[in-house]
Amino acid sequence: MGIILCLLKICLSDYMVKIREVIHRLDPYIPGKSIKEIAAEYSLKKEDIIKLGSNENPLGPSPLAVEAIKNEVNLISQYPETGLKDLQEEIAEYSDVSSDEVIIGGDGADEIIDLLGKTFLDPDCEFIVPIPSYMYYEFNLRNHGARPVYARWDVEANQLDVASVMESISEKTRLIFLCTPNNPTGGLIDKNDIETVLNSTDALVVVDEAYFEFANINNVDLLSDYENLFILRTFSKVMGLAGLRIGYGLSNPKIIDYMHRVKPPFSLTNLSHTAALATLKDREYLEKSAQISIESREFLWTELSKIDQIRVFESKANYLLVDIRNTNLNSSEMTEKLLKKGIIVRDCISFKGLDEYWIRISVGTIEQDKKFIKVFKGIIEGNE
Amino acid sequence: MGIILCLLKICLSDYMVKIREVIHRLDPYIPGKSIKEIAAEYSLKKEDIIKLGSNENPLGPSPLAVEAIKNEVNLISQYPETGLKDLQEEIAEYSDVSSDEVIIGGDGADEIIDLLGKTFLDPDCEFIVPIPSYMYYEFNLRNHGARPVYARWDVEANQLDVASVMESISEKTRLIFLCTPNNPTGGLIDKNDIETVLNSTDALVVVDEAYFEFANINNVDLLSDYENLFILRTFSKVMGLAGLRIGYGLSNPKIIDYMHRVKPPFSLTNLSHTAALATLKDREYLEKSAQISIESREFLWTELSKIDQIRVFESKANYLLVDIRNTNLNSSEMTEKLLKKGIIVRDCISFKGLDEYWIRISVGTIEQDKKFIKVFKGIIEGNE
């Protein structure tokens, strides 16, 4: 019996466990480096590293959120709530919608994107992404077997090429992503253009407003007119809670109900729930938070505009896209040189639709901005 | 133009946005009640409610985890790490495997189940679940369009009907779930039976060991012999971190790599990461945590066994399955009566394979057990 089992096992080992075909076509996994690992690799102190790579809030979290977590920390052995009614209501009030138009995600907006995939995408479907834009749409949705169709973001004009979206729509289109302000370019999409798309399709149009608070503009007013509109948002930016992974979506109650049917019931941690509630109640923090980043963005833009060898694009978000092709460095070389000086920025080579000469700088505090500008100029002038 | 758009919209509203067909067949969403809502509904004090419904740790979290969260709470505005190398290494040491055999989920074991679906299930595939067992396998995996095939857990003998699993295997089988100790029955699966299944298929056999610490037995030794074995675990039970949603899987590095390709990179919150590391280092807490629940389980089992009108099943986990058909109450009536007295237990009607006369009692502290027994007896004797 032992010998028979052994032979069987050898046979089996020839044909590996059955994996989905699409998985074989995905890139192998390369783990990211932690701040601790970066500090060790470049002989830096952890606390000296300036993170301008992930569009985080330079102000840190709301003090009320920190306090609320400390008060509730002993409850971490209990499951989170599944209903989240109180948070739904607070988000509804903040967003000027009703609470049955709200769905909350426990892995930030990324979980909402996954729920959109689970609700709307069959393997033979298509979703439209104007590029360059947020890459996670594709990272996640390709797992559902659906096919990305690329429309065009006009980088030079920093605006959506709306005709390219219209041309991309087919019978198979189920989701259309419109990111405004667009990541990584920072430009806004005109409400008229959004309406043009909404009127041209029965696919769901997902307007990603992750950064809307930095632009003082949003598209919630369209929800009552269009049943195929979905607005995607996050607590990771102006709300200062990137580490706790809270996102939300706004749409008509029918769509929200469908998505709730596939939503993992416990995905929001109880501390995330607590922190989100406390932050929404801290209106003073929220105002200050947006204001500081807007001021800092304008400062950083003005200063970077003075550097001849680069082009910096106007942005309505908390980051700036920079074209560095005239510095004689590509984005990989530039980000490496900055990292050696303890500054993390985003190498945009990972954004489809941009070549190897783009970096994205998150807006920091004015002090961080100044340090970055000094180091950046030094590198460009060849002194670093 | 306004009139044309308006007409177009009316036409559109007749054919709703395109939803996946499978979604229409899912149950509508019914949000769960929070403790606050339960307290209000039954005129109870929040702090008097005893939760014996979710198999949480009655000891609460590790003090080291609580301390670590307090120390790191100001970092919640920063994104979590994507690599999680340190936590992978600690889990590997705890589990006696190497770190490339570990994958970590940010929505507890539930996220790992979703990753299994994304990696292994195509719409025309099948997965096998012996019932009654953990219902989330099906809740999640039906979204992938795959079909559940039910094998049988022999409730009376409280053991897996291994023949029923073998008979359920087909060309289309991709995943087979074996939960040990089984939820909600508490019985273990013989290692020989697990090997029998492993040897009979090239589908992935998922051995769910969420409760293994309460049984003092596990199946990690089989990993080196079977490339189609996957072990599923959680920080929600003996580790006392249900609220922070941490789970992990153990398998051969090839499978772990495939799953990492579809894993959302930021799903584990940074406070969850911190708390998990601190808890794994608190070996004193972990030992005490298992020991207290085991002692309490034996106490509760002994006391419940003395009640003539019920049958209580032996369990190797931190819960007991109870047959209440001779109390003249069904599970809905019984759980409602207990709730009025401030005690939450699990109505097992939601478990496929059990009828309306079963409840599951989580093991509490001895004090909580005593309070439960008193109230439970009162209800059975018709005095409450």
Image: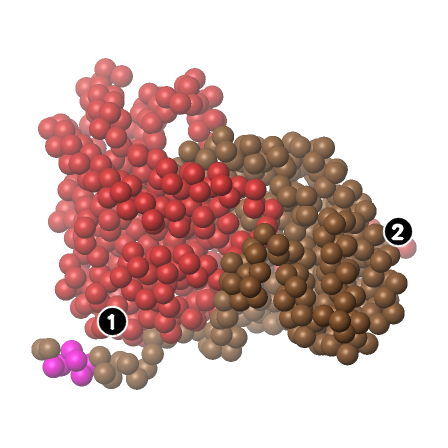
Chain colours: A brown, B red
Mark 1 or mark 2, which is nearer to you?
1
Q: Is residue A331 above or below residue B60?
A: below
- Tell me the quarter of the image containing the N terminus of chain B: bottom right
Dividing the picture into quadrants, the one containing residue B122 is bottom left
- Judged from this view, the residue extending furthest toward the front is A383
Label 1 Cα crowd, 10 Å radius (few <14 / some 14-19 / many 20+)? few
Contact flag, marks 1 and 2 (Cβ < 8 Å): no
Q: Is residue B185 visible?
A: no
- Tag 2 or tag 1, which sits nearer the N-term? 2
Residue found 11% across the figure and 77% down from its top: A2
Same subunit, labels 1 and 2: the answer reads yes
| Position of residue A99 measured from the top left corner of the image (x, y, whole percent) | 63, 37
Q: Which residue is mark 1?
A: B224
Left or right? Give the position of A241 relative to A268: right
* x, y percent for residue A256: 60, 46
Question: Can residue A27 be seen here?
Answer: yes
Nearer to me, B191 or A22: B191
The one nearer the camera, A334 or B143, is A334
Which amino acid, mark 2? Answer: Gly
Residue B2 has which mark? Answer: 2
Task: State the residue lying farthest toward the right.
Answer: B1
Residue B150 figure quarter: bottom left
Label placed on residue A87: none
Chain designation of label 1: B
- Residue B294 vs A376, above or below: the answer is above
In the image, what residue type sits under mark 1? Answer: Ser
Residue A238: in magenta span: no
Tell me the magenta residue range.
A3-8
Query: Residue B274 location, x and y as percent?
Result: 45, 48
> Mark 2 — on which chain does it sit?
B
